[in-house]
Image: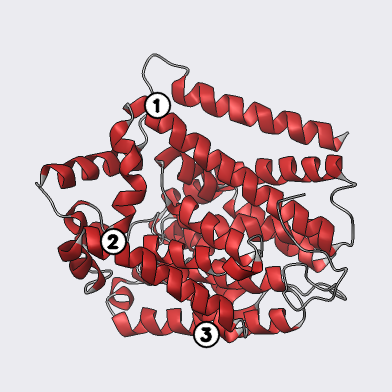
Amino acid sequence: MWSVVAIVALFAVLLALSLAFWGGATPYVFTDLDIYRASLRAVAAGTSNTYAALPYPPIAFVALSFLAYLPPVLGDQVWTALEVALIVVISLVLSMRTLEIQGRDRRAERWTLTALTATAALLLLTTLPVVSQITAGQMSLVVMSLAFIDLCGVLPRRYRGALVGVAGALKVTPLIFVVYYLVTGQRRKAAVATGSFAIVTGIGWAIFPAASWQFWTRVGGSDQFGDPARRDNLSIHSMLTRIAPELGAQSWLWLLLGAAVMISALWRARVHFQRGEKMESFLTVGAAATVVAPIAWPHYFVWLPVVAVWLWFTGRGRARVVAALIYLAYSQATVTTILAPLADAHPRSASVIDILVLIPMAIGIFGLPHRPMPLPDPADSSAPAGSGELALQP
């Protein structure tokens, strides 16, 4: 019965999204998509270079260029459909991995796989990070999805690592997974990721040589990154600024904290990996990496609800308690009805929003709950025959 309810609820949410965006007389305005289009026009007209228009690697303009050829409403619809499709793909991979780690045949349990996918998609679509992704029309979900699919072992072995490199070329932060591959002994994947990053970035240099030089020699230097004291900036830097402006002004302090969180996360990831907990391994790094950059908007945090869904699907006892707490913290309903009103109530309670910063830090420091007696991981190239190879092809 729950399976039918999950599928029906997912379709209801998608219908509600469509009506909210395009059911009225005036189409919904996707702020970031409009910024992307304006940036493309400015660069095409020669009135701005890519870095001044948008502080992304210049190759991102190639990836976004199709928006310039579509009417705005159609472009919005195509982009929204892409983002929803990516959420479904992430949910499908999570569900496939769940069945395989439980030793169940996903081909023989297609209905269960469908129900799990619908449940995961529904859960993800009702969280703050995903809602902010879709309502803004951000490209962060595309970047995160590339890395996630790569890290899950969906690609054929020879290509694993390639999508991490592509994601890093588009938005820099996923390059942490090259370090992750090295720390966990996956040297071939690290080499493939480095190679694909170099190729894609090289294409950007060939098309935008001056802009590429400007971007890659001053990463993080754009004034478009915003006020660190903004409440929707959920980085370690911003948390310190909200606690006390003089703390945020100490660059060494937030850099030290960020480095400590990431070093710990990579160590915890190595421990998970050695236990055969490959999903927990990279999810630990993905979650921790959300808060270490100078800026961390809510849409960066899709890793957190993904962690929650994974722990709920595969965990027991303490793992499910952790999953529920993470999910509730990043639920759109919780933020809208509890955290935001508390933060608005009094200046002293404004820092309540920083619980969303502390959770990724805690994951980086302590790791995720261990699975009891983990089975051989299907995405591991060293898994013995019969453990099942994760692939989207039947």
Q: Report the side of 224 relative to 143 (left or right).
A: left
Q: Is residue 300 left or right of residue 264?
A: left
Residue visible at 69% across and 53% down? Answer: 93
* Colouring used for the render: secondary structure
Who is closer to the viewer here, 239 or 24? 24
Number of dots carrying numbers: 3
Identify residue type, mark 3. Ile
244 over 229 or under it: above or below: below
On the image, the x and y values in percent for residue 257 come to 44, 81
The residue sitting at 22% across, 63% down in the picture is: 222
3D distance between C-alphas at marks 1 and 2: 27 Å
Comes first in the chain, label 3 or label 2: 2
Identify the residue shown where x is 57% and y is 76%. 189
Tell me if mark 1 has few (under 14), some (14-19) or many (20+) residues whose alpha carbon lies within 10 angstroms of its own. Answer: few
- Judge from the rendering whether residue 96 lies leftward or rightward of residue 237; answer left or right: right
Residue position marked by numbered label 1 in the rendering: 74
Dot placed on the residue nearer the N-terminal end, 1 or 3: 1
Q: Which residue is mark 2?
A: 204
Amino acid type at image mark 2: Gly
For the residue labelled by badge 2, is the local secondary structure a helix, a strand or a loop? helix
| Callout 3 crowding tier (Cα within 10 Å): few <14, some 14–19, many ≥20 | some
Q: Where is mark 3, residue-wise?
A: 263
The kind of residue tagged 1 is Leu
Instruction: Give the quadrant of the N terminus.
Output: top right
Q: Are marks 1 and 3 in contact (CB under 8 Å)?
A: no
Q: Position of residue 11 (x, y in %)?
A: 67, 29
The residue nearer to you, when weighing 320 against 220, is 220
The residue located at (58%, 53%) in the rendering is 330
- Label 3 sits on a secondary structure element that is helix
The residues bearing labels 3 and 2 have C-alpha atoms spaced at a distance of 30 Å
Asked if 151 appears above or below 16 in the picture, the reply is: below
* Residue 204 seen from this side: yes
